[in-house]
Image (cartoon, rainbow, N blue to C red):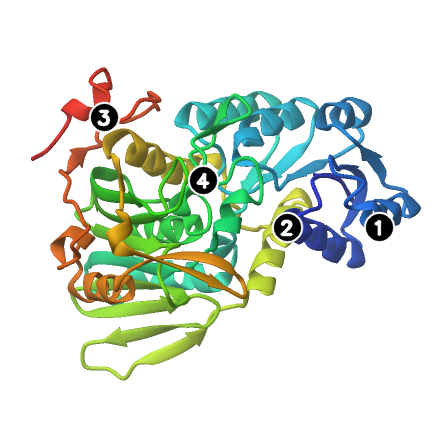
Amino acid sequence: MTRAAIVGVSGYGRWHLLMAMEQSLVGRLQLVGATVINQAEEASICARMRRQGVQVFDRFEDMITALAGRIDLVLLPTGIQWHASMTIAALRAGAHVLVEKPIAATLQDVDSIIAAQSTTDRLVAVGFQDLYVPATHDIKRRVLTGEIGRLRRVTVRAQWPRTEDYYSRNAWAGRLRADGAWVLDSPVNNAFAHFLMLALFWAGNQPEAAAEVVSLEAELYRTHGIESFDTFSMRARTAGAVEILVQGSHAGREELPPEIKITGEGGEITWVYEKEYTLSRVGACAKTFAVPNQLETRLSVLESLVARLRGEHAFIVGPELARAHTRLTNALHEFFPIHIIGPEHIDVAQETDGCFRRIRQFDRTLADAARRNTLFSETDAPWAIAGHAQSMEAYASFAGCWPTRNDCPTTAQSLA
């Protein structure tokens, strides 16, 4: 039986706790330790865990020291700024790790995790949950075997409106740095990270590999009072000449389920979050296949990892695969400025759920860009600002500087 410890039981930690409970019920996992920094707020859960023999700690460091050699797996549903340090500490304590997405904030952190994994001979799995379900790999197989012809484009559209409270829910939301470490929180590194990772995965030319992005063009926008961006539009091109278009926002009006279209010369696959995917081919009737809901998808992550630890064949998202996502998010911050959308383009509305900041007519802009396969600046949006495509062929580390600074080495690599 896998002996596990968890770091955090609030917020997204609830999902990891649920995953652990499900694996415990089927007799594959025993939760033996937990770090809970807000024990007063989570008194009921802490009491329940203690009654079940779980040791509860105030600090991660104390838990790792006390349980070193007695745990097989550490679950890390923590803030992005702690992903690398906690993953490496857990590996060195002899444990495998399930760390939430993204694997880490910077490429250097990812490479440190890869090095630690190599020296400790432990597994690291990353919580890009949609990559753990069979439907995702069915789609990849269809693409690689040419069911829709030569792959041309993958487009992602997502819109999840968020209130101002979303950015005050913790100390790192919307931040570039927190607790002395990089965070780079944004829709592409948090809420929409799953869908960017899916696009990279489906555009990859190997069954378990992501695409290599060689050029990138992006527009980043801010409507809330945050350091990072909440609205974005990007166009990436891969070494295999596939175009990847990803756009979304937390500042639209309607909540739209994330949708991904995979376009080939002979057909198209349309994937809709928690619903279905449809295969449409030239000269054939469309076929629709189910996609698991959020609960089933999330439970599949720990189920797959525990299966691997038991010696069974199961796919997991490792650090090398997850690195493709971090590389792209790092490049976004270093190549492209964050533009502030002026108040003349924003409506502020106090509603039952909280205070929303909405870009005027953004839903139409998003739909127009998705239909025409363009960036926001290529629509009639009055607030949109075009950028220049940047080469990514030599991009391998995060310099930690921004396009507005003259000493940033990446800004000289424009393709325009």
CA–CA distance in space, label 1 to label 3: 48 Å
Image depth: mark 1 or mark 3 in front: 3
Residue carrying label 4: 174
Residue carrying label 1: 44
Q: Secondary structure at mark 2?
A: helix
In screen coordinates, is 282 left or right of 159?
left
Residues packed near mark 4 inside 10 Å, few (<14), some (14 to 19) or many (20 plus): many
In screen coordinates, is 109 left or right of 249?
right
| Marker disc for residue 291 | none
- Of mark 4 and mark 1, the one earlier in the sequence is 1
Image depth: mark 4 or mark 2 in front: 4
CA–CA distance in space, label 2 to label 1: 24 Å
CA–CA distance in space, label 2 to label 3: 42 Å
**Residue drawn at (45%, 31%) of the image:** 105
Q: Secondary structure at mark 3?
A: loop
Inspect the image, locate mark 3, and give the three-letter code of the amino acid beneath it.
Thr
Residue carrying label 2: 302
Residue 378: percent from left, percent from top: 12, 54
Q: Hey, which quadrant is residue 368 in on the image?
A: bottom left
Q: Hey, which quadrant is residue 281 in on the image?
A: bottom left
Residues packed near mark 3 inside 10 Å, few (<14), some (14 to 19) or many (20 plus): few
Residue carrying label 3: 404
**Residue drawn at (22%, 24%) of the image:** 410
Q: Are marks 2 and 3 in contact (CB under 8 Å)?
A: no
Residue 324: percent from left, percent from top: 36, 38
- Of mark 2 and mark 3, the one earlier in the sequence is 2
Inspect the image, locate mark 2, and give the three-letter code of the amino acid beneath it.
Leu
Residues packed near mark 1 inside 10 Å, few (<14), some (14 to 19) or many (20 plus): few
Residue 172 appears in the figure? yes
Along the line of sight, which residue is nearer the eye, 278 or 257?
A: 257
